[in-house]
Amino acid sequence: MNHWEIKNRIRKRVAEEEGVLRKVAPLNVALCHPAPYEVAMSSLGFQAIYQEIHKHPLAAAERAFLPDNPGEYRRYRVPVFTYENERPLSDFPVIAFSIAYELEITGIFEMLDLCGIPILSGERTARHPFILAGGPLTISNPAILFPFVDGVILGEGEERIHQFLDLAAGAEHKNLRDKLALLAGCYVPGVSAEIPAPCRVLDENLPAASRILTKNTVLSSMFLIEPERGCSRSCAYCVMRGPRGGGMRTVPAEDVLRRIPENARRVGLVGAAVTDHPQIFDLVGGIVESGREIGISSLRADRLADHLGEEFVRLLAKGGYRTLTTAADGASRRMRDMAGRNTDERHLARTAELARLAGMSRLKIYEMIGFPGETMDDIEELIRFSLEISKIVPLSLSVSPFVAKRNTPLGGAPFEGISILESKYSRIRAGLKGKVEIKPDSSRFAWIEYMLSQGNDSAGLAAMNAWRQGGRFAAWKQAFGSL
């Protein structure tokens, strides 16, 4: 792979996209996602901000992503460049990062460094781009970003980005920082006195929807749209719960269906609690009966079991579902109650039955272990019940360690030791005896995520040091050990 092969690969991706926006404007923004293309372009939030920037009369956005193989870029001295016009990030007056969660922070370091832009904001001058951050991470813990960015828009940024662009189109670098600090929901390191409450978009500006369709993503050629935003539930570990997440705001089914373009053959309904939408039957029915495939980001077992039932799950099967996916998020009833999950064994067993009755090949359950107070008795309950479910329908368990997030009731909970988590993984594997497929997430990466989720700007600096030392686990341990 050489310089031209890298560019040709990008050009091939762009040629296969539908809906790319191009515009000549006084202010050009490099809109960046610190994840590879196939992940980033499956982000509805990223696509929503892309469209909002283009709606501004004075601004245009060009997209850039973390390279699939950053080492290739270093070897051939290729800077990260935009997909629309192949311009390096260093050419732009503004670079805006959309960041989903903590571990993506190293993608920011990589992208800036490949372009010769100092990673630390204190080492940049007025000739360097203004670095703006936004995205889901800003709801839980934006502090780890503070050493590296010039400003942060917290929470839902679709409206606030227009105010930022108004300022950026007419302000010098230093003045832009001072002016941004005056906007509600925005934080400027070294200028703002405190971290403000996150922004919340007016209901009339919902829903967000995809702009660009492409087969080269995790959600191949799927048009994404949100029938609801936020969540009315009270899961103690979730940053979307309660007032801070904005509550649950629904969009009428007819408005959602009207927004789906004719050329969209696959439609994804995105949200924290899509099956809680009061018109979910109408939504799914309208999409499936039009001959499209459907995907839903969150299927709640209690809703499937007690309210939606067999007819709904058969609709999903007609819309292309082969695996029904839900979440338990608690190894036992005791753990689920502690975490605020309104899910019991009856709901999960009924969901398994619905999957079998609809002719689906498998049930997949997302599970979390390592909640405060969890014991091996809870793990044994998980094993026992998983074996029971597997007798109804083939079962896959996707198991991840619990990672506490700030601004949640469990925000200060400790992380269970890596060795304890590994022993629980071993017991689950042995107990399931190959009768249930298990896909465990890395306990080591979960520990890194935890240290970042609980940290401040010092944790961000530790992340930079670990990245500079190669990013291996030993480097992270050493970096956090110095805090």
Image: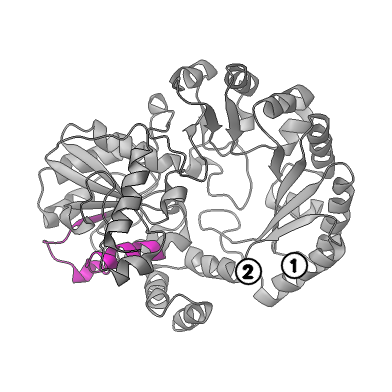
Side (left or right) of 125 relative to 315: left
Residue 331 appears in the figure: no
Question: x, y (%) of residue 302?
Answer: 75, 36
Render colour scheme: one colour
- Tell which of 328 and 374 is nearer to you: 328
Residue 178, picture quadrant:
bottom left
Residue 256 inside the magenta-drawn segment: no
Circles 1 and 2: CB distance less than 8 Å? yes
Q: Earlier in the sequence, mark 1 or mark 2?
A: 1
For badge 1, the amino acid type reads Tyr
Q: Give above or below for 117 relative to 348.
A: below
The quadrant the N terminus occupies is bottom left
Side (left or right) of 209 relative to 321: left
SS for callout 2: helix
Question: x, y (%) of residue 236?
Answer: 63, 51
Reading the image, the residue beneath label 1 is 425
- Tell which of 97 and 1 is nearer to you: 1
User: What segment is highlighted magenta in the picture?
Assistant: 106-131
Separation of residues labelled 1 and 2 (CA atoms): 10 Å
Reading the image, the residue beneath label 2 is 443
SS for callout 1: helix
Label 1 CA crowd tier, 10 Å (few <14, some 14–19, many 20+): many
